[in-house]
Amino acid sequence: MHYFESLTNRIKKNLKPLRKWSEKNQFEAFRIYDRDIPQFPFMIDIYGQELHIQEYDTGWIMPEDEYIAWLSGVKNAVSTATQYPIKNFHFKRRAKQKGKSQYEKQANRGREYAVREGENFFLVNLEEYIDTGLFLDHRPMRLYVGEHSKGKRILNLFCYTGSFTVHAAKGGASYSESVDLSSTYIEWARRNFMLNEMDLNAHHLMKQDVFMYLVEAIQHNKKFDLIVLDPPSFSNSKKMLETLDIQKDHERLINQTMQLLNPDGLLIFSNNFRNFQLSDQLTGQHKVENKTNMSIPIDFRNKKIHQCWWISHR
């Protein structure tokens, strides 16, 4: 048992200040452990009364019976540290992701839970997909968008389950468009909108390829005050006209998006490709500020979880 004490103690140490912080800010979903100790390669997140635990693939080889015993010890250590019963654990093994596999189904079941983030509520599914429906690392930017949306027109590209738009609507946005190619996530976003009693006449969900949307929006001279652009690193979905490679395609994607931005507007661009390099051409064409440091939440030990820039017209 002594072997697992370090895990229990680390989680307890992490959790003490995080519980106070989360209760003060009404955050029901937050990270409490992320591979802090190399022998325990897990990522552990609290979602209300549930615990989401992901084991990272390290390539270690362990006989099945030893692995089962080791995993049982890990779960007992986590339960002791958090006081959450093991029946409330949702466990996944997370392999290195390629293409769109980060969004693919992992199971055919999984009930939805509503979790609070400030004044808003979001539906998460801790079983069915690798990702839960709420990217916790974007919390600071969601809060920023909520605080700076009053009376503004908002565009959310690659909107996933619409969490940025929910914050914008609660913050008083007058109009929004949220675009994603996935029927699953557009419908999930719709349920988030309804959960937060958003006006669906003012806040529009659009199932469309973002590249196609941009071409049509430019043709129709659409304009927005605040745009969120958070694309996947790579996507080869058969529904898309072309493969998305964020390193190769980001310059065109940003330049097209900037055509939709009002003169005094702001584009928030983010992605989680570890080796991403922003094009020098963009810094010459637009005003670009690296906001990565302020965009990483305090509950994340991994400060390279994503990169974030604010882009505006010169």
Image (cartoon, rainbow, N blue to C red):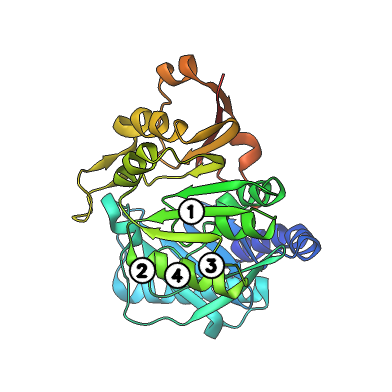
N-term-proximal mark, 4 vs 1? 1
Residue in the picture at 59% in, 58% down? 33
State the quadrant of the N terminus: bottom right
The CA distance from mark 4 to mark 1 is 15 Å
Helix, strand or loop for disc 2: helix
Q: CA distance from mark 1 to mark 3?
A: 10 Å
Question: Would you name the residue on which mark 1 appears?
Answer: 177
- Mark linked to residue 200: 3
Q: As shown in the figure, which amino acid type bears the numbered disc 2?
A: Thr
Residue named by callout 4: 188
Secondary structure beneath dot 1 equals strand
Left or right: 186 as drawn, with respect to 261: left
User: Looking at the image, do the residues carrying marks 2 and 3 touch, with CB atoms under 8 Å apart?
Assistant: no
Residue type at numbered disc 3:
Leu
Q: Mark 1 or mark 2, which has the lower sequence index?
A: 1
* Residue 271, percent from left and from top: 45, 41
- Residue 76 percent across, percent down from the top left: 56, 77
**Front-most of 35 and 302?**
302
Q: Are marks 4 and 2 in contact (CB under 8 Å)?
A: yes
Where, by quadrant of the figure, is residue 263 drawn? Answer: top right
Give the Cα distance between marks 3 and 4.
14 Å
Task: Tell me which numbered mark, 2 or 3, is placed earlier along the sequence.
Answer: 2
Q: Amino acid at mark 1?
A: Glu
Instruction: Identify which residue is drawn at 54% across, 36% down.
Output: 267
The crowd level at tag 3 (other Cα within 10 Å; few <14, some 14-19, many 20+) is: few
Q: What is the secondary structure assignment of the residue under circle 3? A: loop
Q: CA distance from mark 2 to mark 3?
A: 18 Å
Label 4: which secondary element: helix
Q: Which residue is mark 2?
A: 184
Closer to the N terminus: mark 3 or mark 4? Answer: 4
> Which quadrant of the rendered structure holds the C terminus?
top right
